[in-house]
Image: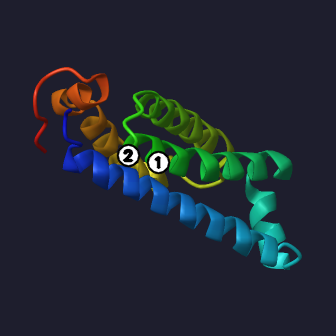
Amino acid sequence: MTARPISITVIGWILIVFGAFGVLGILVTAAMWNSPLMQQMLARVHAPIPVQIAVGVTGMIIRPACGIALLLRQNWARFLYVGWSLCAFAYTIVSSPYTPLILIPSVVLTLVIVYFLFTPIARQYFTGNGAQAKV
């Protein structure tokens, strides 16, 4: 059996923690729902409020699910993470009232994660090929 690379363990836990932050974000949004400031912020986004909520909840579910699946050696989780990231970036670019430059830290982090998810060692781990994976 191939040992799980440290990079995959770290990424899995990062995605689980980001999912927890997503839950926190949804709870804060719900608690401040009637606040004029919250309504003003939601109104600035170029998407209907139900779509905003749906995208937020979907991301809150997908990220930790991918993190858990990565820890359980599920190859599909790598591809789901990449697909969801592309959809989330497209949604943000289309709907955000802010400049796309604000996405740079998120894009950089995502690219780093994707790099480590698709290194030869990670591929060996997820496909079961090769001897020991060390990262």
- On-image quarter of the C terminus: top left
Residue beneath the point at 39% across and 57% down: 13
Q: Is residue 39 left or right of residue 7?
A: right
Residue beneath the point at 21% across and 31% down: 119
The picture quadrant where one finds residue 10 is bottom left
Residue beneath the point at 33% across and 48% down: 108
The residue lying toward the viewer, choosing from 50 and 98, is: 50
Q: Is residue 10 visible?
A: yes
Q: What residue type is disc 1 on? A: Ile
- On-image quarter of the N terminus: top left
| Residue at which label 1 appears | 68
The picture quadrant where one finds residue 133 is top left
| Residue at which label 2 appears | 71
* Residue 30, image x, y percentages: 80, 71
Colour style of the rendered protein structure: rainbow
Tell whether label 2 touches label 1 (CB within 8 Å). yes
* Residue 87, image x, y percentages: 58, 34
Q: Secondary structure at mark 1?
A: helix
* Residue 99, image x, y percentages: 54, 52
Q: Residues within 10 Å of mark 1 (few under 14, many from 20)?
A: some
